[in-house]
Image: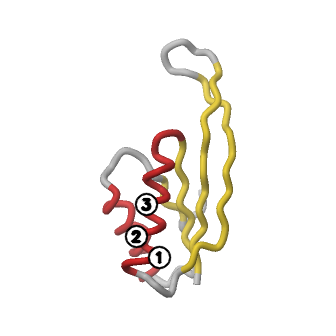
Amino acid sequence: MDPNTVLIGQKPVMNYVLAGLTLIQNGSDSVSLKARGRAISKAVDVAQIITKRFATEIDIKNIEINTEVVESRETGKPSNVSSIEIQLGK
């Protein structure tokens, strides 16, 4: 996995904002936010907070949406899960 990637999950939004800002402050030119399922809206929130409030020199460069086939933990059957990758950069 790319070291400039922030995987969005169940933690509070500001934890992921801080992780993204830390990558930017450490000299990274780009940051990638990845999320699946219900965390997609949180990834969008993180991208907006970073670009509008904290690091106004950072822009959204690319957004990719996808569907991944994931095996269910309970039933073992495959199910489709939506995913998003938001690339931020200078």
Q: Secondary structure at mark 1?
A: helix
36 relative to 46, above or below: above
Q: Quadrant of residue 89?
A: bottom right
In the image: residue 5, left or right of residue 53: right
Res. 14 mark: none
Looking at the picture, tell me which residue is in the foreground, 5 or 44.
44
Q: Rounded to the nearest whole Å, what is the CA distance between mark 1 and mark 2?
A: 6 Å
Tag 2's secondary structure? helix
Residue tagged 2: 49
| Tag 1 and tag 2, C-beta contact below 8 Å | yes
The residue drawn where x is 63% and y is 24% is 79
In the rendered image, residue 86, in percent from the top left (x then y), is placed at 59, 62
Tell me if residue 58 comes above or below residue 64 in the rendering: below
Identify the residue under disc 1: 51
Residue type at the position of mark 3: Asp
Mark earlier in primary sequence (1, 3): 3
Residue at 65% x, 21% y is: 78
**Element type at marker 3?**
helix
Q: Give the alpha-carbon distance from disc 1 to disc 3, as whole Å.
A: 10 Å
The x and y percentages for residue 77 are 62, 16
Q: Which residue is mark 3?
A: 45
Give the residue type that dot 1 points to: Thr
Disc 3 packing (10 Å; few <14; some 14–19; many ≥20): some
In the rendered image, residue 14, in percent from the top left (x then y), is placed at: 31, 62
In contact (CB < 8 Å): disc 3 and disc 2: yes
Residue sitting at 49 percent across and 53 percent down?
7
CB under 8 Å between discs 1 and 3: no
What amino acid does circle 2 point to? Answer: Ile
Give how far apart the Cα atoms at labels 3 and 2 are: 6 Å
